[in-house]
Amino acid sequence: MDFANLEFQPGTFDAVHAMNCLLHVPNAELPSVLTGIRDVLRVGGLFFLGVYSGDDEEGVTGWDEHVPPRFFSWRSDERLQQFARESFDIVDFHIVETGTNHRFQSLTLRRPA
């Protein structure tokens, strides 16, 4: 099952965890993916979202050695929080420096009533 087609009943989960997978979802599709995640959470349920940041760029990178190459959507802190606020309340947002040009973005989100 993928995030774009969650086949669970509404309110099924107390929490959802997504680590480094939503950075492969295009910006055009992210709002519906986040809405789907919100819908499978109970009211007040938590969603942890962890991804690497960037400069609001999307596409296939030249350095990816996977076959086929993967799509990446590198989002700024502001852009990612904007997407999150469309479906969730932000409980916590912080970044972790990684020593590379991609910092790690950590969000704890809550499904509103």
Image (cartoon, rainbow, N blue to C red):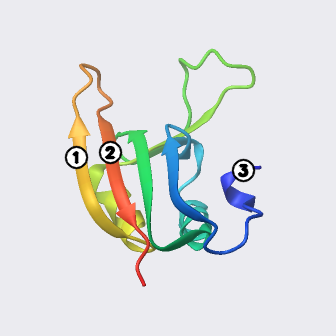
Point 63% across, 15% down: residue: 65
Numbered badge on residue 94:
1
Residue 67 location, quadrant: top right
How many other residues sit within 10 Å of disc 1, few (<14), some (14-19) or many (≥20)?
Answer: few
| Residue at the bottom extreme of this rendering | 113
SS label for mark 1: strand
Percent position (x, y) of residue 85? 36, 71
Relative side of 99 to 7, left or right? left
Numbered badge on residue 17:
none
Relative side of 47 to 98, left or right? right
Relative side of 66 to 54, left or right? right
Q: Amino acid at mark 3?
A: Asp
Structural distance between the alpha carbons of marks 2 and 1: 5 Å
Point 55% across, 60% down: residue: 30
Residue 106 location, quadrant: top left
How many other residues sit within 10 Å of disc 2, few (<14), some (14-19) or many (≥20)?
Answer: some
What residue did someone put label 3 on? 2
Percent position (x, y) of residue 38? 53, 69
How many other residues sit within 10 Å of disc 3, few (<14), some (14-19) or many (≥20)?
Answer: few
Percent position (x, y) of residue 5? 75, 60
Numbered badge on residue 106:
2
Q: Amino acid at mark 1?
A: His
